[in-house]
Image (tube, grey):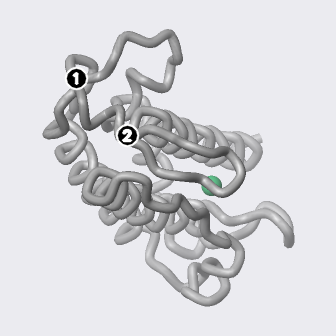
């Protein structure tokens, strides 16, 4: 399945714009990892590096934060944009015990819901801003661009882990 978003996004040269939907490449990458045994997916490349399973839980949780943020900014313009402590979440929310298949399913479902929500926004709503403590005012456009890049980077990270294991 391929969700298209370009029609409602402003023209922009940033490559992430065209990739906010569930793109084929991302799904192919996902399938490599999704077919792994849960035990293999949980194996960390080194003690201080996240496992593939942990990365996928991080993506699912980030999608929750993303969806909440979009709703907050559109519903309550000027709302404060906060980050979250990813390492604290990883430990406290037992990322190491999660089932990678369920995490993938969550990530996809949350992403699809967020894409559907973004599609429903008017061009004016894409310009609504929240307030980031350090970066200042940020529009929905900027927030989307940031999050779209985030998952691509992590899928590349997964590809690198898989490639290093294949050697
Ligand atoms: Ni991340």
Q: Position of residue 34 (x, y in %)?
A: 43, 57
Quadrant occupied by the C terminus: top right
Name the residue: 57% across, 79% down. 95
> 18 and 53: which one is in front?
18
Q: Position of residue 130 (x, y in %)?
A: 46, 50
Camera-near label (1 vs 2) is 1
Q: Left of 97 or right of it: where is 126?
A: left
Nearest to N terminus: mark 1 or mark 2 = 1
Mark 1 → mark 2, Cα distance in angstroms? 22 Å
Q: Position of residue 153 (x, y in %)?
A: 62, 40
Residue annotated with mark 2: 27
Q: Position of residue 48 (x, y in %)?
A: 85, 68
Above or below, 27 against 59 in this view is: above
Ligand 1: quadrant of the figure? bottom right
Q: Secondary structure at mark 2?
A: helix
Q: Quadrant of residue 92?
A: bottom right
Residue 138 visible: yes
> 78 and 65: which one is in front?
78
Name the residue: 39% across, 65% down. 64
Quadrant occupied by the N terminus: top left
Residue annotated with mark 1: 8
């Amino acid at each position: 399945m391929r969700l298209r978003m370009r029609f409602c996004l402003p023209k922009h040269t940033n490559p992430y714009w065209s990739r906010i939907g569930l793109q084929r490449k991302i799904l192919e990458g996902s399938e490599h990892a999704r077919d792994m045994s849960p035990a293999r997916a949980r194996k960390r490349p080194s003690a201080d590096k996240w496992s593939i399973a942990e990365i996928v839980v991080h993506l699912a949780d980030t999608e929750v934060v993303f969806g909440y943020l979009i709703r907050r900014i559109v519903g309550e313009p000027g709302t404060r944009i906060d980050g979250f402590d990813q390492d604290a979440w990883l430990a406290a929310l037992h990322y190491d015990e999660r089932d990678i298949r369920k995490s993938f399913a969550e990530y996809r479902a949350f992403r699809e819901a967020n894409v559907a929500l973004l599609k429903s926004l008017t061009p004016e709503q894409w310009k609504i801003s929240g307030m980031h403590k350090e970066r200042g005012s940020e529009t929905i456009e900027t927030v989307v661009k940031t999050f779209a890049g985030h998952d691509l980077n992590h899928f590349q990270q997964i590809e690198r882990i898989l490639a290093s294991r294949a050697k």
